Amino acid sequence: MGEFQNLKSLFMAKVGSTTTRYWVYPRGAGGTAAAPTALGTVGIQCISDGAVATQVWAPYIQIEAAARIPSPCWLVGYYTHNALLDAPFNGDLSIAIGAAAAEVDILVVPLNGWVASAVGEGVTPWNWLPFPIRIDGSPRVAARVRKFTAANAAGVTLKIIVCTGLGTG
């Protein structure tokens, strides 16, 4: 592909497309079948169960059931809201796709939480990925946390941000 075609493709993917849309999941309260909700709505509670020791992954928490996200779509970011804390923590957040007990991590990122002094503080809310991650086939989406502190129930509320129509005209 020549330079002009590459530039044209990039323009259509990032600027010129009339079909690109952004959505957040889970949809509705607790991932109901309602239409996708606006950013800022509290998502799922992605926390340690209180018994998980330091540097051990907590169980996966479902973000969205299979056949509920568009295919194809691109994971472009995630949204973390108020930290759910027993104590400040550092750790990792993993977003995965696949059936329960067969999840495959597609994103693992560092996570930092601290005791908030007011609602809305505690975790960086908007996290945009430098490159989108393509998701095909509308799989189940789940997340989990790993803390680098002693066992507690720390974590965050979470939504994922997906894009549809990327690179189409």
Image (spheres, grey):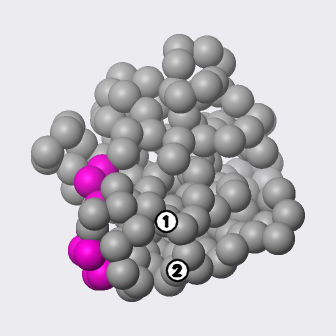
Can residue 20 be seen in the rendering of this structure? no
**In the image, which residues are magenta?**
53-60
Q: Which residue is mark 1?
A: 154
Is 39 located above or below residue 49 in the figure?
above
Please state if 142 lies on the left or on the right of 86 as rendered. left
Q: Which mark is residue 89?
A: 2
> Split into 4 quadrants, where in the image is the C terminus?
top right
Q: Give percent across and percent down for residue 90.
A: 50, 83
Is 30 located above or below residue 146 in the figure?
above
Q: Does the magenta run of residues contain 144?
A: no
Please state if 160 lies on the left or on the right of 41 as rendered. left
Please state if 11 lies on the left or on the right of 28 as rendered. right
Chief secondary structure of the magenta span? Answer: loop
Secondary structure beneath disc 2?
strand
Q: Nearer the viewer, residue 129 or 30?
A: 30
Can residue 149 be seen in the rendering of this structure? yes
